[in-house]
Image (cartoon, rainbow, N blue to C red):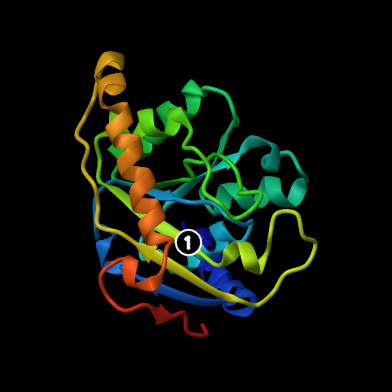
Amino acid sequence: MRWYTFFRVVAKVVAWRLVRLEVAGRSHVPREGPFLLIVNHLSFVDPILMMAACPRRFHALAKSTQFASGRFYAWLLPRVLAVPTRRYKVDPQVVRTVLRLLEAGEGVCIYPEGERSWDGAPQPLRRGSVRLLLKAGVPVVPCGISGSFEAKPRWSPTRHRSRVSLRFGRPIVFGVHDTRAEREAAFDAAAERISSELARLSGPPDAGARGAATPLSAP
């Protein structure tokens, strides 16, 4: 895990140079034990900001095509604990991997919208992501990002050093839903809760997590 520690420092340097990042609610991330980190996705810089801001180490789901986009990414992504997943498809291997990581007491980060926003607006949650958190039964920490779309929109080749806010919310415990029938019965309420929390945490500052946001200081 030494590579992860090294790249977390790199992420802090990059985040400090890319944006003016303010973070709130770090204390909501469990100090120990398994957890799922559920984050809205606005820009390619989001994973860098998450790695810089989260007080716990975590594994993050990343599209499998990134692992095949060149030798550098094939080397880098496993060292920052990225887990390859196929987008728009049910991926049983990823589900098994995530559950094993959680059983080992690790944290896992999921972007439940499945891809970056095209216009800065929230996107529907992927059904597989919601089913996974219901099956896992571990604390779910919602995290809202705002401002990263303005810093680096998906369609723009340029970036801007704008203000970005990242807020961790209180953990949500949905309980374990072992069977498909149990997960389907709980799906709508869970999806609504997650969508509502992400909207709240990525909204105006007074709607975010408890505690004042603090700027990310220079490493």
Q: Amino acid at mark 1?
A: Ile
Mark 1 lies on a secondary structure that is strand
Please tell me which residue lies in front, 194 or 21: 194
Residue occupying image coordinates x 64% and y 56%: 44
Q: Find the residue positioned furthest to the bottom.
A: 218
User: Is residue 199 toward the left or the right of residue 8 in the image?
Assistant: left
User: Is residue 172 toward the left or the right of residue 10 in the image?
Assistant: left
Assess disc 1: are there few (<14), some (14-19) or many (≥20) residues with their C-alpha within 10 Å of its C-alpha.
many
Residue 86: image x %, image y %? 60, 30
Task: Tell me the quarter of the picture where residue 156 sits.
Answer: bottom right
Q: Which residue is mark 1?
A: 145
Task: Tell me the quarter of the picture where residue 53 sits.
Answer: bottom left
Residue occupying image coordinates x 50% and y 64%: 146
Q: Is residue 213 above or below residue 170?
A: below
Residue occupying image coordinates x 47% and y 70%: 165
Residue 100: image x %, image y %? 36, 33
Q: Is residue 201 above or below residue 99?
A: below
Q: Is residue 76 above or below residue 190?
A: below
Residue 33: image x %, image y %? 24, 49
* Residue 148 appears in the figure: yes
Residue 116: image x %, image y %? 61, 48
Please tell me which residue lies in front, 142 or 13: 142
* Residue 5 appears in the figure: no
